[in-house]
DNA sequence: CTTCGCACCTGTTGGC
DNA sequence: TGCCAACAGGTGCGAA
């Protein structure tokens, strides 16, 4: 999945290439792409046709584009998108051949480049829903926490909430109601930077350890964003199809058996929450069993 | 309330 | 060459 840096790269692309344009037509090529739009694909299409997308916003890994005010909708509405594990939003010339996993196409009244939603695994999706005051956050996204790069991120509140949890620290990092935007790659990278094993119990972390962890999260997200995100393959690209370069700078994620950049010890892969976790066994020792 | 496991999909990779 | 298991960057839901 695209995590915060990759989604933010996409948001910037939408802001530049799509915001301010008026939808001419919408084609839904796969019903799963709009499954969260409970009124169905036809209603989804009708809700967007003729409407102007005013801006592009992000909360965690969700994106939304408010629709310009219109007589047909008294309250504001917005096009909400989540990329899931493999979703892409691409801005392309109409002559470009359709992608194998093209799920939806938006054309615009200016006759310029199309917006396409391409999604191999169909875990992502699009929905139109109410967004109070136009620019307000859609209710579907209300449970997603502010991300740590946002100036309004409340560090003391996060620290308290994290230490109140009775779980392992990596689980907490991946919990989007606690902190937005962190996924499997950047959780592992952040934990390595903070020299913490993902299985550390949250209720035993000191304030200093949480501060180190947040420093790790912020620095790795910021650096990844500056590199255009992490792309191992063509599945994670910006709206123009270009890959990011952060994969070169990963210290532990996907680096099993390679030396830790800090101490040279071989990185280990462990199964964790039915997925992979990577860490340095020397810098990030497993916690002792609870007594 | 919190916490956890799994279902939801398609494709690629590597071992036998 | 084929087959099959394991794995891939996420989230929502139901169960305990």
Image: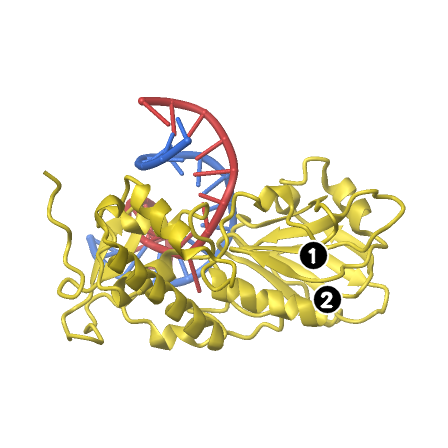
Chain colours: A yellow, B blue, C red
Q: Nearer the viewer, residue A233 or A198?
A: A198
Q: Read off the residue under disc 2.
A: A18
Judge from the rendering whether residue B8 lies leftward or rightward of residue C7; answer left or right.
right
Give the spatial CA distance, label 1 vs label 2. 9 Å
Q: Residue at x 79, y 43 (%)?
A: A75
Q: Is residue A101 visible?
A: no
Image coordinates of residue B12 in percent, x first then y, are: 41, 62
Q: Read off the residue under disc 1.
A: A65
> Which quadrant of the view contains residue B14?
bottom left
> Which quadrant of the view contains residue A57?
bottom right
Foreground tag (1 vs 2): 1
- Asked whether disc 1 touches disc 2, contact meaning CB atoms under 8 Å apart, the reply is yes
SS state under label 2: loop
Check the image and report above or below for A230 versus A166. below
Q: Nearer the viewer, residue A248 or A53?
A: A53
Density class for disc 1 (Cα within 10 Å; few <14, some 14-19, many ≥20) is many
Residue occupying the far front of the picture: A156
Check the image and report above or below for B1 versus B9. above
Quadrant in the picture for the C terminus of chain A: top left
Q: Residue at x 22, y 64 (%)?
A: A195
Image coordinates of residue A111 in percent, x first then y, are: 84, 69
> Which quadrant of the view contains residue A15?
bottom right
Image coordinates of residue A261 in percent, x first then y, are: 22, 76
Q: Residue at x 30, y 46 (%)?
A: A163
Q: Nearer the viewer, residue A117 or A36?
A: A36
SS state under label 1: strand
Label 1 resides on the chain identified as A
Judge from the rendering whether residue A50 lies leftward or rightward of residue A141; answer left or right.
right
């Amino acid at each position: 999945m695209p995590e915060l840096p990759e989604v933010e790269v996409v948001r910037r692309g939408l802001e530049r290439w799509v915001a301010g344009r008026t939808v001419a037509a919408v084609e839904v090529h796969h019903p799963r792409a709009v499954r969260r739009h409970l009124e169905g694909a036809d209603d989804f299409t009708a809700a967007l046709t003729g409407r102007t997308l005013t801006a592009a916003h992000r909360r965690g890994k969700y994106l939304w584009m408010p629709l310009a005010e219109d007589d047909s909708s008294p309250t504001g509405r917005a096009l909400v998108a989540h990329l899931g594990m493999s979703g892409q939003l691409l801005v392309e010339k109409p002559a470009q051949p359709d992608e194998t996993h093209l799920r939806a196409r938006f054309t615009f009244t200016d006759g310029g480049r199309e917006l396409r939603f391409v999604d191999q695994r169909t875990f992502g999706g699009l929905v139109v829903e109410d967004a109070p005051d136009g620019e307000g956050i859609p209710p579907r996204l209300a449970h997603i926490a502010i991300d740590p790069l946002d100036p309004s991120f409340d560090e003391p509140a996060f620290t308290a909430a994290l230490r109140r949890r009775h779980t392992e620290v990596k689980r907490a990092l991946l919990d989007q109601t606690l902190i937005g935007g962190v996924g499997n790659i950047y959780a592992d990278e952040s934990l390595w930077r903070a020299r913490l094993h993902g299985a550390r119990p949250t209720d035993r972390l000191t304030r200093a350890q949480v501060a180190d962890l947040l420093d790790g999260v912020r620095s790795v997200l910021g650096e990844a964003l500056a590199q255009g995100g992490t792309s191992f393959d063509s599945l994670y690209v910006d709206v123009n199809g270009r890959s990011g370069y952060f994969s070169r700078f990963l210290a532990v994620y996907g680096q099993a058996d390679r030396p830790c950049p800090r101490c040279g010890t071989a990185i280990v892969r462990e199964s964790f929450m039915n997925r992979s976790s990577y860490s340095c066994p020397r810098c990030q020792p497993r916690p002792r069993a609870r007594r």
